Image (cartoon, rainbow, N blue to C red):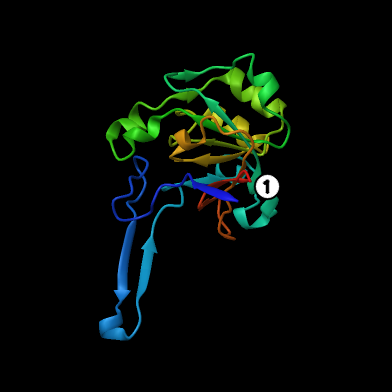
Amino acid sequence: MKLIDISQALNNDTPVYPGDSKLSLVEDKTLKNDGYSSYVLTSCLHTGTHIDVPMHMTGDDRTAADFPVDCFSGRGVLLDVRGEYLIAMRPCFESIVGEGDVVLLHTGFDKWYGKVSYFADRPSVSKELSEFLISRKIKMLGMDMPSPDRPPHDIHKALLESGVILLENLTNLEALQGIGDFEVMALPLKIAAEASFVRAVCMMREEG
């Protein structure tokens, strides 16, 4: 089994969504002074590679801890949408995307991660594409950008209201280009909150 990491690192340089608190990772106990090392993390949960569950923008009161773990894994489908500012529906998606899939949008926008433009100039998912993904009852929609849309977040809300979990701030999706079957796993912490950090990976069987 080969694993491909599609997660951004969490550290004190991790960019945060405008208006969110900056991540702080501090070693408050050291091996030299205390006999062990221990870090304290302070952060908004919508930082780095993370999932949003419906509670984030809907009246659903289930936290990340309330969802079965199989909600966060499934057959992966990579949609190459690089160069699109408004990510449109294409007829070919009809034969690619199936029920229960984890759809990954490869925008290539992760190259701007850490820059102002990453948040200010990101692409958006079209209403037509979001409605198609909802109709296919996909499990998760992942993307190498911070959000599928902009305020007032109608696409965000529509996806979450339909039970589609969002997987944001991915990277390294180019490593999946040309690969056939793969599985995506992005397990959240068992946390009573509307979002969670994840270590997102793609898994594929090695030939031979």
> Residue 20, percent across and down?
37, 46
Left or right side of 152 for 68: right
> Residue 128, percent across and down?
61, 17
Residue, x 71% and y 37% (percent of image)?
A: 100
> Residue 134, percent across and down?
67, 28
Q: Is residue 67 visible?
A: no
Compared to 145, does 66 lie above or below?
below
Disc tally is 1
Residue, x 67% and y 36% (percent of image)?
A: 101
Label 1 sits on a secondary structure element that is helix
Residue furthest left in the image = 32
The residue that mark 1 highlights is 71
Of 189 and 36, nearer the camera is 36
**Quadrant of the rendered image containing residue 162:** top right
Left or right side of 6 for 20: left
Which amino acid, by three-letter code, is at mark 1? Cys
Compared to 38, does 141 lie above or below?
above
Compared to 164, does 123 lie above or below?
above
